[in-house]
Each structure stands twice: as C-alpha cells, then as structure tokens.
Image (cartoon, helix red, strand yellow):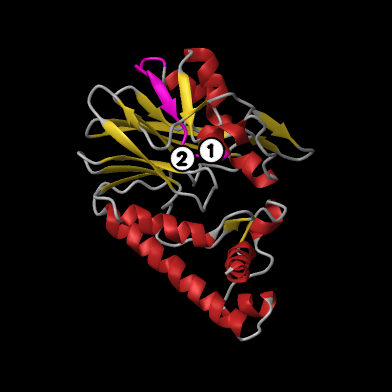
C-alpha cells in the first residue's frame, strides 16, 4: 500500500513475527508509514482458541500466517481496532465462531470511527456480528479451561481470560506498561484501578498482555501499574481539591495540554485525558 504526496512517497511497512511460549503460539504485528514499526499488538493461539485478531492494516499477512494453523474459535478481548480489526475477514475466511463480551458484540455491530493517528497506525475495524459470551461461564478447550474476567476501564467492554491451572492471564490492554502518559477520551481511571485490583486477586505468573507480554512475575508488573495509577489519581485529586483548574493541574504534574498525540488524534488520545478522567471520577463520588 502506498500513499503519494507531491514530493514524497510513503509505503506502509508491515511486520509480523511468530514465536512460542510453552503451548502458546503468538504473533507480534506492527505497521508504520514512516519506517520500522515501534508499537506491536499480539494475537495468541492456544489449543485451538485464537485470542484477538490483530489490526486491519496487516490483515493479509496475518490471515496468510493463520493458513497452516488449527483454529476452532476466536475470543476478542475488546472492541479497539488493534484487537478486533480482522474479525470480519477471519470470520469470512475460516467460518469460525468469534466470541466477545455482550458490550463488545454490540459496539462492533457499528464500530466508532477511529482518529487519524489510529487509522494510520492500525486501520479502521469493520462491522461484524459476533457471538456473546456468557460472562459467568468459561471458555473450554480440550486441554485448558479459561475463566472470563470482566475488566472495564481502558474500554468498557474489556475482558481477560485466566487459566488458573497454568497461571496464565491473557490480559488484553489492562497492562500495556507499568506506566502510561496518555489516555483515550473515554477511559475511566477509577474502573481501571478496580479492574487491576480484581486481577491481583488471581493466582498467575504469566502475563500475556496484548502489547507487552511478561513471561514471569506478571503480578508484580500489574501491581506496578496499579501503584502508578493510584499515585497519579492521588496527585490530580490533591491539586483539584486545592481549586486548581485543568491547566494548573497539568503544569503541576509536568504534563502538556497540547501534546503530539492530542494533535494527531484530534483529541481522542492525550495527556489531558488522563487528568480529565480523574476529575470526572471525583465529581461522580
């Protein structure tokens, strides 16, 4: 795929690599118009269950990579385009049933338009009709049993899959990193904090994050992320209780009101969204 301007030609660079951990196959996928991808999203295959479908910009390469795999069904962790983006194409090609939380099923019947930077990085996901999971039930394969854990916050429809016998947690975007500096405009920091607390009550060591997997000490990584969010929440709350406005809070925390992510995403992704999420939570409580 190429995009031409008067003086420049940009070519989409897609990178996909396969690796294995224990009984799990995983594909790391990234796309970039300006050189080697710096951000990757993972799709996992375990005992016939595919977890997430990657992003639309890498659709052909990913579907080709799955040609030699045995896939019985697929589970989507949440509706964001880097996780659900190839669900429609996968369903058409392999004729498998794809499951998601009821909220995710409803959202993907008519997915929201993504921002320019999301479209450039991942692409726009398509409408697709999925099968609703019974969130009180389990996802079972021949060898493994996965509990479904509801973990809203980063996205209202997000779930994790937890294999207690193996100590595996397929965590969607609950981790991503021990710290973050941008939020989407509809993220809920209070729900994220509660979801991380819920995750920490599980007995796992392997954290199969959709962007940054950790193959040991997974709970320690989640705890670090939780501590970061709690500290951030506390600092914003302290400034807000002093009567500081949004600009003053950002300055006190060394954050920018107009960062590059906010500009390129038309406000959907930014540092200021993190502060606004705390303020919304404070005003609810």
Q: Please tell me which residue is depicted at 22% across the width and 25% down the height of the picture.
A: 143
Q: In terms of secondary structure, where does tag 2 sit? A: strand
Please name whichever residue, 239 or 40, is drawn nearer the observer in this view of the structure. Answer: 239
Gap between marks 2 and 1, in whole Å?
Answer: 7 Å
In percent of width and height, residue 228 lies at 42, 67
Question: Vertically, is 84 above or below 193?
Answer: above
Is 262 inside the magenta-drawn segment?
no
**Residue at the extreme bottom of the image, as rendered:** 242
In percent of width and height, residue 82 lies at 53, 38
Disc 2 crowd rating (10 Å Cα; few below 14, some 14-19, many 20+) is many
Q: Please tell me which residue is depicted at 51% across the width and 53% down the height of the picture.
A: 153
Please name whichever residue, 184 or 36, is drawn nearer the observer in this view of the structure. Answer: 184
Name the residue carrying label 2: 41
Q: In terms of secondary structure, where does tag 1 sit? A: helix
Disc 1 crowd rating (10 Å Cα; few below 14, some 14-19, many 20+) is many
Main secondary structure along the magenta-highlighted residues? loop
Residues shaded magenta:
67-80
Name the residue carrying label 1: 82
**What is the quadrant of residue 129 in the picture?**
top right
Q: Is residue 79 left or right of residue 49?
A: right
């Amino acid at each position: 795929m190429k995009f031409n301007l008067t003086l420049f030609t940009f070519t989409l660079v897609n990178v996909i690599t396969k690796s294995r951990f224990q009984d799990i196959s995983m594909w790391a996928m990234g796309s970039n118009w300006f050189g080697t991808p710096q951000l990757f999203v993972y799709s996992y295959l375990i005992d016939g269950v595919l977890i997430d479908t990657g992003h639309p910009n890498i659709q052909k390469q990913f579907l080709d990579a799955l040609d030699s795999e045995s896939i019985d069904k697929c589970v989507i962790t949440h509706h964001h385009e880097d996780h659900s983006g190839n669900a429609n194409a996968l369903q058409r090609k392999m004729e498998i049933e794809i499951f998601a939380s009821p909220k995710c099923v409803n959202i993907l019947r008519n997915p929201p338009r993504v921002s320019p930077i999301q479209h450039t990085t991942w692409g726009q996901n398509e409408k697709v009709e999925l099968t609703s999971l019974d969130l009180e039930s389990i996802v079972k394969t021949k060898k493994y049993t996965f509990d479904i854990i509801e973990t809203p916050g980063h996205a209202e429809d997000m779930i994790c899959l937890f294999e207690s016998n193996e100590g595996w947690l397929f965590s969607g975007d609950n981790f991503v990193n021990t710290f973050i500096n941008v939020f989407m405009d509809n993220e809920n920091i209070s729900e994220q904090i509660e979801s991380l607390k819920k995750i920490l009550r599980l007995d796992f060591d392997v954290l199969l994050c959709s962007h940054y997997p950790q193959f040991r000490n997974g709970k320690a990584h989640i705890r670090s992320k939780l501590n970061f969010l709690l500290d951030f929440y506390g600092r914003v709350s302290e400034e807000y209780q002093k009567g500081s406005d949004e600009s003053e809070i950002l300055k006190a925390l060394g954050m920018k009101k107009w960062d590059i992510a906010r500009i390129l995403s038309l406000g959907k992704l930014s540092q200021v969204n993190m502060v606004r999420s705390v303020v919304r939570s404070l005003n609810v409580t």
